[in-house]
Image (cartoon, grey):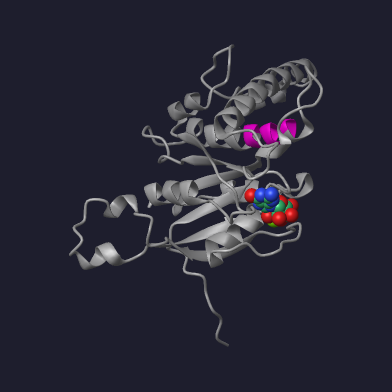
Amino acid sequence: LYRARTPTSLPSFLLVGPSGSGKTSLLTVFENGSPAPTHLSQTPSTVQVQLPPSTKADSQKYRSEHDPTAKQRPKFLIIDTPGHGKLRNHAFEQLRKPQPHLKGIIFVVDSASLSSDTPGRSAAGLTEAAQYLHDILLLLQKRYTGAKSSKGPPELPVLIAANKLDLFTALPAQLVKSALEAEITRIRTTRAKGLLDSAVKDETLEEEREWLGDGGEGKFEFGQMEEVNVPIKVVGGNVIGADGSDISGWWEWIGEQL
Ligand code: GTP
Ligand code: MG
């Protein structure tokens, strides 16, 4: 029986982020150039994508126009995962298994869900996004601190795709960055306290107690993740909008990883 196989040697990118942030919509734009209607995802799905002619891959930057390989548009895989709180095991599973071809992680966030109407209280969308991002980053940090070789694992870049910038309630990318950093700072402190409390009862929790970032007590900043080989960039865009989609900044980031 003939079965079409997905080539496993292609570079791949993992799409993660809260439910409704626009991952599957983005997948359809990556695949077809325009958005298609989506449903809440319940299982991961993989598509093969080709870099558009307008985007240069980093590996081809210095090739001359006359080099025939300069015209080859690199192919890669994008793995979409469900963002619902009860279905995130799919994303974590992808990250726990060894991924020699994984070139980066794209964390999609709904930039219009992050600002609060109540002063002094974080929006539910911000807390959810920051918690999910915190857990992903902690996993990537453990991948580094738990590595057997002295060199540590290879670089694994993260793109935070600040999506839905077409909506007037959306925070611009720079504010998405600072809002997420501030909320992760809060989460980090709460988690550490929670674990301290339970560790009194259960000594085995000791080793679980891990602090995201460089051990600093102060503010968490994405730049701290560079110490564990995880460079993070926040880039804005929109998958859907009155003037069409604008995902050029995300294409560019993908090109930089290829
Ligand atoms: P899960 O599968 O539950 O994890 O969600 P998802 O991240 O795949 O979200 P999905 O792509 O299904 O999009 C959710 C909703 O957001 C859909 O109604 C999209 O039309 C809408 N949406 C996605 N991107 C944009 C955008 O850039 N702007 C606006 N205005 N709406 C968007
Ligand atoms: Mg989806």
Where's residue 58, x and y in %? Answer: 32, 49
| Magenta-tinted stretch | 126-134
229 in relation to 255, above or below? above
1 in relation to 71, above or below? below
Q: Is residue 3 left or right of residue 110?
A: left
- Give the overall secondary structure of the magenta segment: helix
Residue at 70 percent across and 23 percent down: it is: 187
Residue at 44 percent across and 52 percent down: it is: 100
Pick whichever, 190 or 65, lies toward us: 65
Q: Is residue 155 left or right of residue 18?
A: left
Pick whichever, 182 or 103, lies toward us: 182
Residue 11 visible from this viewpoint: yes
106 in relation to 43, above or below? above
Where's residue 115, x and y in %? Answer: 72, 29
Where's residue 175, x and y in %? Answer: 59, 28
Residue at 55 percent across and 29 percent down: it is: 174
Q: Is residue 216 left or right of residue 21?
A: left
Pick whichever, 230 or 233, lies toward us: 233
Quadrant where the N terminus sits is bottom right
How many callouts does the rendering have?
Answer: 0
Q: Is residue 21 magenta?
A: no
Q: Residue furthest front?
A: 243
Q: Is residue 130 magenta?
A: yes
Residue at 78 percent across and 47 percent down: it is: 86
Where's residue 27, x and y in %? Answer: 59, 59
Name the image quarter holding residue 54: bottom left
Q: Is residue 142 left or right of residue 85?
A: left
Residue 82 visible from this viewpoint: no
